Amino acid sequence: MQIDVHNLSFSYGHRTVIDSLSLSLSSGDYIVIRGKNGTGKSTFIKCLLGMNPVKNGMIFYDHQDINYFKEWTSFGYVSQKFEDFNYEFPITVNEFLSVSSLKKTSQSDRLKALDQMGILELLNQNINNLSGGELQRTFIARSMLNNPKLLILDEPTASIDKLSTEYFYKAVNQLNLQGVTIILVTHNESLGHLNYSHVLTMFSDGTYTFQTRDRCDLTEVDL
Amino acid sequence: MVLSFFTDLFQQDFMMRALLAGLILGMLAPVIGSIVVIRRLSFIADTLGHFSLVGISVSLFLSTLGISIFFERPLYLGILFSVVGGLLVELFRRSYKNYKEISMVIVISLGAALSAMFFSLSKKTGSLYNYLFGSILTITNYYVVLILITAVIVFTLFLIFGKQIVAVSFEESNAKMLGVNVGVFQFLFMIMLSIVVSVLLESVGVLLISSMMIIPVATAMKVGWSYRSTTIIGIVFSELSVFFGLWMAYSFTIPSGAAIVSINVILLLIVSFIKRIRTGKRLKKEPLTNEAIE
């Protein structure tokens, strides 16, 4: 998915957190967004998801203005926490995945998504019996279920262990290899294990740097 | 006593009507109730019930003024006011975003106050008792048909939009991403809930509506392992409470709503007790290791 951001600015009251941000991404790009707490990373993600209204500047998806954009189902989104989700009412992972897509998904689609995250055995487990890490991997599997063109990941591995993190980045690289555009927000300063094409570094005064790098062959990435 | 109950059940028309209405409501209440529980709106049924009562009291008041159009069918104004109550809840919720329960307290208080006023002005406070505690044994054929139509509409909506309803209820933000119009869904659900609450009012009474919707689901949550199983188990508990509640209401001449809800609570206590014992036994067999605790 082609993404164009032009002179995007966003403020909370008098505090500017994003100041005239411009960037362009093509299908299959992989951008890492980094910065300390309060530098506007999540604000930028919310702008991209249409949760924050874009009043100053413009965002285009495949040359379509975000204000008229309708194909949100082509997005996958994984946040750090899922505070909005009701964890207490019984629902199996299979049921959860099945209601997570308005398109009819087959059992094999759901199994494939779980397998990519290494949690195939959780298919018939009640969600409220899962550990934090298993739950996060289930949410990540869900984001892959709709075959997204754009995957937005807001510190997705913050609460999961090393093995799960490895599974996760392998799966992300696979999706990227298939042409899915990836936007990854991370606190982690070390980017060695990621096969990114761009880095956006955001600062607390609203400024930013945007760098592009030549990528190594994805198939050679050793996680 | 038990024998005469069964004999009358199949010989007396009023008993057949009560059983039929009760069984349909017993299925309808937990299906809607499960969504109410998932959305953490357990008080909403009580709130809408109180506003539905305003509609009924207004119907009676209008009849004293000579406007008897709603006197025979007070349920119509009951449904209308219930919808108004639901819209008021949504309105107040926007003012108190982080204190959702405040909106329900405001609307429930307003509903109780207005109903008391109009019942008093209509000078028909005698019928208030039935509306507060329910009278399933006195319902008419017309009311049974109304319940049946409501059930058919609700189940059809669930068949068509079940996925969207469950998606929005479990996680609103993700449903938005999926392209579900959450605002439209909330409005439709509120209307559906208002109608169900209004039809429940006559059989279980305004004070016990939420119990009929919520307690079977709360019991089922203790033993259910999936959304589907929890809903089905909730329906089974609800039907059991309707049947035995009907028997109690008939045998001891007590309000049907009170009897049904009492059985619901007894079932909840029994299931909780059994689950506690079974969990205790399992923990004794498989004591938690340090690894499991971590």
Image (cartoon, coloured by chain):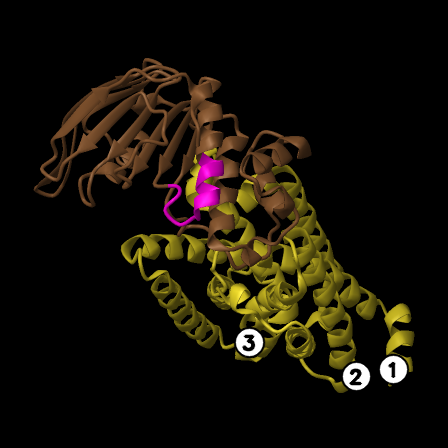
Q: Which residues are magenta?
A: A156-168
> Residue B128 bears which disc, if any?
3
Depicted B71 relative to depicted A16: above or below: below
Q: Is residue A142 visible?
A: yes
Which of these two is toward me, B9 or A205?
A205
Q: Judging from the image, what is the letter of the chain drawn in brown?
A: A
Q: Is residue A183 above or below residue A3?
A: below
Marks 2 & 1, CB-CB < 8 Å contact: yes
Nearer the observer, disc 2 or disc 3?
A: 2
Q: In the image, what residue occupies the spot 34% across and 41% down? A: A155
Q: Secondary structure at mark 2?
A: helix
- In magenta segment, residue B126: no
Across and down, in percent, residue B149 comes to: 69, 49
Asked if residue A158 lies in the magenta stretch, the reply is yes
Alpha carbon of mark 3 to alpha carbon of mark 1: how far? 30 Å
The local secondary structure at tag 1 comes to helix
Are discs 2 and 3 both within one chain?
A: yes
Q: Which mark is residue B2?
A: 1
Q: Which mark is residue B251?
A: 2
Query: Tag 1: residue type?
Result: Val
Q: In this structure image, what is the colour of chain B?
A: yellow
Q: Position of residue A219 (x, y in %)?
A: 47, 20
* Vertical relation: B273 (above or below) A111: below
Residue B140 in view: no
Disc 2/disc 1 C-alpha distance (Å): 8 Å
